[in-house]
Image: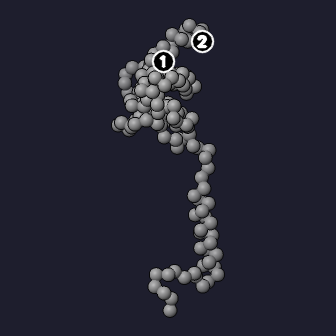
Amino acid sequence: MKPPGRPTAPADPRARLALTALACLLALGACGDDTDSEDSAEPVGQELGGSVAQLVQCRDWVAASDEQKLATIADIRSQVNREDAGVTASELTDEEAMEVFDNGCDEPAAAGYRLHVMYARAAAFKPLREIAEGTN
């Protein structure tokens, strides 16, 4: 008689093989592919109403990874450039937003600056910048 609470291995070799195969499949299923890490990255900053756009600050930006920064830009863009707002605004590319935030958050004194304000101001001046540079 076996002691209570202690599992025993299946006596049938086919059952052992099936359990081994199942264990291997479970182990391989836990291994992920990091190719879509940008899609799974979360934006940085405190969330309010399903978005970090209103509260994210330079201190959050400086501590973020590149993937988190791109997710944060996408979140801010989705809130500043809302389609249901009835107002059209210029939209910054990821590279333009990165440049604005990297330069604006460069100094330690900027730690409390709100990124959505920086984004909105840079986007507002984008058409004038394009005219001045002749890229319009």
Q: Residues within 10 Å of mark 1 (few under 14, many from 20)?
A: some
| Residue 37 versus residue 82 in the image, above or below | below
| Label number found at residue 23 | none
Residue 117 image-quadrant placement: top left
Place of residue 40 in the rendered image (x, y in percent of width and height, measured from the top left): 52, 43
- Colouring scheme, one of rainbow, by chain, secondary structure, one colour: one colour
- Horizontal relation, residue 39 to residue 116: left or right: right
Q: Which residue is mark 1?
A: 122
Place of residue 61 in the rendered image (x, y in percent of width and height, measured from the top left): 49, 31
Residue 81 image-quadrant placement: top left
Q: Residues within 10 Å of mark 2 (few under 14, many from 20)?
A: few
Q: Of helix, strand and loop, which one carries label 2?
A: loop
Q: Residue at x 60, y 12 (%)?
A: 135
Q: Which residue is mark 2?
A: 135
Q: Amino acid at mark 2?
A: Thr
Q: Of helix, strand and loop, which one carries label 1?
A: helix
| Residue 53 versus residue 16 in the image, above or below | above
Place of residue 36 in the rendered image (x, y in percent of width and height, measured from the top left): 58, 43
State the count of labels. 2
Mark pair 2, 1: CA separation: 16 Å
Residue 18 image-quadrant placement: bottom right
Place of residue 113 in the rendered image (x, y in percent of width and height, measured from the top left): 43, 24
Q: Observer-nearest residue: 17 or 70?
A: 70
| Residue 51 versus residue 136 in the image, above or below | below
Point out the image quarter for the C terminus: top right
Kindly tell me whether residue 77 is visible in this rendering: no
> Which tag, 2 or 1, sits closer to the chain's start?
1
- Horizontal relation, residue 72 to residue 22: left or right: left
- Horizontal relation, residue 55 to residue 99: left or right: left
Kindly tell me whether residue 25 is visible in this rendering: yes
Q: Amino acid at mark 1?
A: Ala
